[in-house]
Image: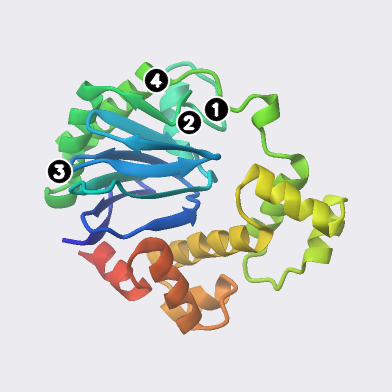
Amino acid sequence: MGIVYKSGPVPKMEVLLCTDDFEFRPHIHDRYVVWINTGGGEHYTAKGSTDILGKGNISVFEPGLVHSNHPASGSRRCLRSFYLDPEFFHELGRKAGASPRANYFTRYTFKDPESWSKLARLHGRMLTGPADLSLDTDILDIFSELLARHAGQNRGAETDGCDKRVQMAIDYFHAHPDTDIRLQELAELAGCTEFHLIRLFRQHTGLSPHALLVQIRLEHARHRIEKGDSIAMAAFSSGFSDQSHLTRRFKLRYGLTPKKYQACRMK
């Protein structure tokens, strides 16, 4: 089957099924990603640590976390991902009496065979079944239960938070994805030297400023494509030199060309 993306019945929700050996190089999401693998192990790296997502285990990464993943050696891959807008978890948290947080989960990966089985069945239904009242209800019930079981204090302690200078630069990237941003301009905005800013970026995100900007531009282009923009317009509004440039980068990041991604979501 390869790689399949499909929008979910909940606003700003998407699911992914990956059954080939495509390597997701260091990247970000502007949404939460909830992972399970029903075929084999998934090797991942995040914040300098590596682990394998095995059967019965669930991984949850918060928006903006740089991570990479590929199938564990010799395993039969069936990676299932849910991409959820932060507001989805904020709403579930509010209903449970919790205040909005940057991250609701205490660990990247946790073992929970019961929730794992429910997520696996839910993912299959979202890929192949019709959207109906039963599915809507199960989505809210299953993710509310996941939050109730595994939410805790924010994993990011003071020493683990993003440096305010890096965050300022990231916010600038989000606000100006189509702008030709220079390192000197960024350093002046952050109030530090260019060399120090590069070190801060690599320390707090694992990527250089330019590499992270490319990831933010790709997410911006994906949003524009979802909203119905042409691929050429999505490339222009996201800071890519032309449609070909976006297509090359997009395929490296998502495993599909923008055209195929667009076709997946129209099914």
On residue 210, the disc is none
The label nearer to you, 4 versus 1, is: 4
Kindly check if marks 1 and 2 are in contact, taking CB atoms under 8 A apart as contact.
yes
On residue 150, the disc is 4
Q: Does residue 10 appear in the picture of this structure?
A: no
Left or right: 124 as drawn, with respect to 172: left
On residue 125, the disc is 3
Q: Secondary structure at mark 1?
A: loop
Kindly check if marks 4 and 1 are in contact, taking CB atoms under 8 A apart as contact.
no
On residue 100, the disc is 1
Q: Does residue 260 appear in the picture of this structure?
A: yes
Q: Residue at x 26, y 70 (%)?
A: 263
Kindly check if marks 1 and 3 are in contact, taking CB atoms under 8 A apart as contact.
no
The label nearer to you, 3 versus 4, is: 4
Q: How far, Cα to Cα, is label 1 from label 3?
A: 29 Å
Of marks 1 and 3, which one's residue comes earlier in the chain? 1
Q: Give amino acid for label 4.
A: His
Q: Secondary structure at mark 4?
A: helix
Q: How far, Cα to Cα, is label 3 from label 2?
A: 24 Å
